[in-house]
């Protein structure tokens, strides 16, 4: 059984179809990278999987359970996933440590001491041990995103969704965040991520999916997609990325 | 600069002559601006004083409003009345905060079961923001006791507190609601995606941020509440205004009102300055 199965997923905003019948399966420990032009629906797809948006048609199964069922417990589903956005992730009125321990303590009912010990372990693993007591606005953008990823990790999710987590960062800060994602992959985490860093996508993805106008146009290994794309649109997109010197 | 094109690494900072000169000019300028401010303030005060004291009615005004003997006579009782104002304020303020926050939270409930509550909260804010505070005080002060309900308070000051709480609660609810809505939607998404329920998201993520933002406007409302405690005088408890009225009625001299006014100013000015200070501080923090 696949960890995540998306079948015939449609989403429209004000009559405009943003996702058009997406089919996608993700196996445990697989890293799926979504690429596509801005506006092609990558974020919307991730938000639908996290139930932050309600799908207009189709189904999503997580571990065999249909999470798009109207009777599904959305909070319970979200407990099993972590999502990190481009920005505004951390709660500005809490220290990094409190940000990370909030969900374990209040949602998963872990004791404060245990939650803090686990948080400090994670912070140390990702090189942020010294920042536990800092507030988000005392951190660099890269440190903030690392802390946000750690926070999503702290509840030991089955699946991580990362939406352009490096797009708001200065180039020299991108590397440290990518390092964290690399480390997650080594730990066997199942991930769906969207990124503009094509080099990184090629390196880390097991599967690359190309979205175009809400359609999952092409899917394959990084070698297939980057070296030998089957569709003219994919080729065009990759060419435009090369022209923008992002590959 | 070294010959190979590398920049010299600066060692220690020694203030350059240019910087010394700059700082001297800055000091000179700020001294000049403060002396200009002092002189112009003195001139304005002299002018105002001259206009008042040379007006035809000044001797009579001086006698009826600025009578030092009457002032000394009335002060003790006005002051004791003023303690009631402070008491009303101190009891009403926390009640208003609680009512305001509860109403704001109720208006944000999304589940359909809460529809009646939500509608009630909307009706409450609409009505009590629309009705003048003094009317609310009349209606509560004379209406509630008339209902003759068991356990209904009859103490005038208590009724005053209830009326002020109802009236100000509606304003404060709107302040809280604006604060809650000003928290970026991504914060909601981030909290919900961690599995926090609506209630927990409110409690741990949204409300703490909202409260921090609305402290300056709330304090502003409280400055206004401090003086509006005098409106309670209209239903009869012996507060500062009522004591002053009693004095004025027996002596035909209005100096006691001045005494009451001074007391209110003494209370509101520190609060107003504190509000300014907090506003300036949060401004500065945002500017960083
Ligand atoms: N909340 C929304 N309301 C209306 N339109 C939206 C909303 N969110 C996204 N869209 C539209 O959906 C399309 C896909 O957006 P998005 O999923 O953010 O694309 P991507 O992440 O690939 O750049 C865009 O045309 C965008 O304008
Ligand atoms: Mg996006």
Image: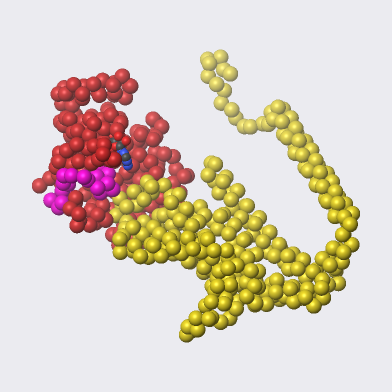
Chain colours: A red, B yellow
Where is residue B140? Give x, y as percent: 54, 74
Residue toward you, B5 or A196: A196
On the picture, is A134 further left or further right than A64? Answer: right
Residue at image position (28%, 48%) is A52
Q: Name above or below for residue B239 compared with residue A128.
A: below
Q: Residue furthest top?
A: B3
Residue toward you, B94 or A156: B94
Does the magenta segment cover residue A65?
Answer: yes
Does the magenta segment cover residue A39?
Answer: no
Residue toward you, A190 or B174: B174
Count of marks overlaid on the render: 0
On the picture, is B178 further left or further right than A189? Answer: right
Q: Name above or below for residue B204 compared with residue B81.
A: above
The picture quadrant where one finds residue B222 is bottom right
Residue at image position (74%, 73%) is B244
Specify start and end residues of the magenta stretch as a single range: A46-66
Q: Is residue A203 visible?
A: no
Q: Name above or below for residue A144 compared with residue B205.
A: above
Where is residue B71? Give x, y as percent: 81, 70
The picture quadrant where one finds residue A145 is top left
Where is residue A128? Give x, y as percent: 38, 45
Q: Name above or below for residue B46 compared with residue B65.
A: above
Residue toward you, B141 or A55: B141
Q: In which quarter of the image is the C terminus of chain A?
A: top left
Residue at image position (44%, 46%) is A136
Residue at image position (26%, 39%) is A15
Q: Can residue A72 be seen in this view?
A: yes
Where is residue A150? Give x, y as percent: 33, 47
């Amino acid at each position: 059984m696949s960890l995540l199965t998306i079948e015939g997923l449609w989403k429209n905003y004000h009559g405009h179809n943003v996702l058009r019948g997406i089919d996608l399966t993700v196996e445990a420990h697989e890293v799926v990278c979504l690429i596509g032009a801005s506006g092609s629906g990558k974020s919307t797809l991730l938000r639908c999987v996290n139930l932050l948006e309600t799908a207009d048609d189709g189904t999503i199964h997580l571990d065999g359970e249909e999470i798009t069922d109207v009777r599904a417990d959305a909070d319970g589903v979200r407990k099993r996933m972590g999502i990190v956005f481009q920005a505004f992730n951390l709660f500005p009125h809490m220290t990094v440590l409190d940000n990370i321990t909030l969900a374990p303590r209040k949602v998963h009912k872990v004791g404060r001491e245990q939650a803090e010990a686990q948080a400090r372990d994670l912070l140390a693993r990702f090189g942020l041990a010294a920042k536990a007591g800092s507030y988000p606005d005392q951190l660099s953008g890269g440190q903030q995103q690392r802390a946000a990823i750690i926070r999503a990790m702290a509840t030991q999710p089955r699946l991580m969704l990362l939406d352009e987590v490096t797009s708001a960062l200065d180039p020299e800060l991108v590397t440290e965040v990518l390092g964290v994602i690399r480390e997650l992959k080594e730990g066997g985490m199942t991930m769906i991520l969207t990124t503009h860093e094509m080099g990184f996508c090629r390196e880390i993805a097991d599967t690359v999916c190309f979205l175009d106008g809400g359609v999952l146009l092409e899917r394959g290994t990084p070698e297939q997609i980057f070296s030998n794309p089957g569709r003219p649109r994919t080729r065009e997109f990759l060419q435009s990325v090369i022209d923008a010197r992002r590959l | 600069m070294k010959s190979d094109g590398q920049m010299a690494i600066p060692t220690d900072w020694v203030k350059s002559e240019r910087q010394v000169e700059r700082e001297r000019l800055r000091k000179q300028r700020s001294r000049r601006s403060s002396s200009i401010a002092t002189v112009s303030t003195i001139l304005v005060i002299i002018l105002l004083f001259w206009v008042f004291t040379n007006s035809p009615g000044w001797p009579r005004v001086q006698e009826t409003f600025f009578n030092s003997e009457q002032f000394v006579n009335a002060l003790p009782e006005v002051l004791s009345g003023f303690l009631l104002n402070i008491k009303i304020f101190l009891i009403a303020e926390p009640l208003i905060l609680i009512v305001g926050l509860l109403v704001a939270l109720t208006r944000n409930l999304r589940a359909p079961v809460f529809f009646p509550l939500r509608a009630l909260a909307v009706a409450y804010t609409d009505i009590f923001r629309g009705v003048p505070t003094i009317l609310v005080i009349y209606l509560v002060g004379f209406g509630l006791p008339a209902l003759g309900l068991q356990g209904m308070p009859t103490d005038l000051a208590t009724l005053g507190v209830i009326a002020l709480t109802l009236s100000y609660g509606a304003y404060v609810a709107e302040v809280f609601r604006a604060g809650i809505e000003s928290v970026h939607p991504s914060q909601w998404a981030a909290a919900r995606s961690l599995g926090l329920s609506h209630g927990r998201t409110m409690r741990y993520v949204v409300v703490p941020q909202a409260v921090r933002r609305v402290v300056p406007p709330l304090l502003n409302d409280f400055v206004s509440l401090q003086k509006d405690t005098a409106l309670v005088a209209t239903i009869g408890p012996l507060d500062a205004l009522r004591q002053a009225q009693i004095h004025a009625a027996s002596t035909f001299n209005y100096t006691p009102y001045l005494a009451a006014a001074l007391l209110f100013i003494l209370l509101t000015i520190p609060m107003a300055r504190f509000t300014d200070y907090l506003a300036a501080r949060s401004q500065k923090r945002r500017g960083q």
